[in-house]
């Protein structure tokens, strides 16, 4: 089953199972992000990906300059508390052998602290790099970050989701779940910046993009 189908089924179940008043808050928040057209202000295809220096779950410092593969996939996710993110991370793990054959590196980035990133990586059985973007500094430089409204924070707390504990701050800021495909020149050859967190880039499409886009290093 495609990732889009899995996500759509989860969203449909949420609409049935979540109390109507809470679901309305969640939908309103997503619609507000869409109205702000954040995606149009984010980094896009043709732009150069800025450098990053971020810690991974093993305490290593990872840099953009440190990768020597033909392509790099950078996937932003909200946190391990988000079921849609976990579904996407697992789907990306499934295509990792094919990405390796295509000499393509995959990294996932979230504002979670390294300790919480370890939990996310372990529970999803991830073998690619999971990086912590503390305070969303890097995601902000790409134009991906927005602040959760007060009513949505209350809804999340009622679900026992404490974004502030996962991120180690009180900002209540999250990145859009963007995916960037980058070549050796650090040029973005494909960008996916959904304002709706229940929508993600199909892993199969990532493979098609790389196979059909020769690396121009």
Image: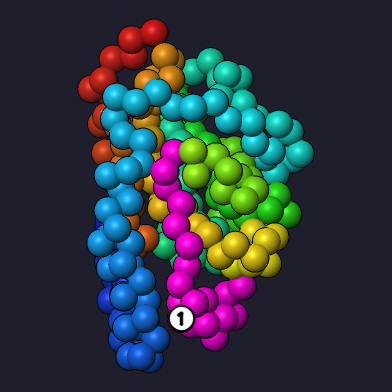
* Residue 73 place in picture, x, y as percent: 43, 33
Q: Name the residue located 53 percent from the left edge and 59 percent from the top edge.
A: 173
Q: Name the residue located 61 percent from the left edge and 73 percent from the top edge.
A: 162
Please give left or right for residue 186 compared with residue 52 in the image. left
* Residue 190 place in picture, x, y as percent: 29, 31
Q: Secondary structure at mark 1?
A: helix
Q: Is-magenta flag for residue 29?
A: no
Image quarter of residue 142: top left
Quadrant the N terminus occupies? bottom left
Taking depth in this image into account, of 213 and 19 the one nearest to the observer is 19
The answer to whether any part of residue 96 appears in the image is no
The answer to whether any part of residue 48 appears in the image is yes
Span highlighted in magenta in the image = 142-162
Please give left or right for residue 77 compared with residue 36 in the image. right
* Residue 94 place in picture, x, y as percent: 43, 44
Q: Mark 1 — residue? A: 151
């Amino acid at each position: 089953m495609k990732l889009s189908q899995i996500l759509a089924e989860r969203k449909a179940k949420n609409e049935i199972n979540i109390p109507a008043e809470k679901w309305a808050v969640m939908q309103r928040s997503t619609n507000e992000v869409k109205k702000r057209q954040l995606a149009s202000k984010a980094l896009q295809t043709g732009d150069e990906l800025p450098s990053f220096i971020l810690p991974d779950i093993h305490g290593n410092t990872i840099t953009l300059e440190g990768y020597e593969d033909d392509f790099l996939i950078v996937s932003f996710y909200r946190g391990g508390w988000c079921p849609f993110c976990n579904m996407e991370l697992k789907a990306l793990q499934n295509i990792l052998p094919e990405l390796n054959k295509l000499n393509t590196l995959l990294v996932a980035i979230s504002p979670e602290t390294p300790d919480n990133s370890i939990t996310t990586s372990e529970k999803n059985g991830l073998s690619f790099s999971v990086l912590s973007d503390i305070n969303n500094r890097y995601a902000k430089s790409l134009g991906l970050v927005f602040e959760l409204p007060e009513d949505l924070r209350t809804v999340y707390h009622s679900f026992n989701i404490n974004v502030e504990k996962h991120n180690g701050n009180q900002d209540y800021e999250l990145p859009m779940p963007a995916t960037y495909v980058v070549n050796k020149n650090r040029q973005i050859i494909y960008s996916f910046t959904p304002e709706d967190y229940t929508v993600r880039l199909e892993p199969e499409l990532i493979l098609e993009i790389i196979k059909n886009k020769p690396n121009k290093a």
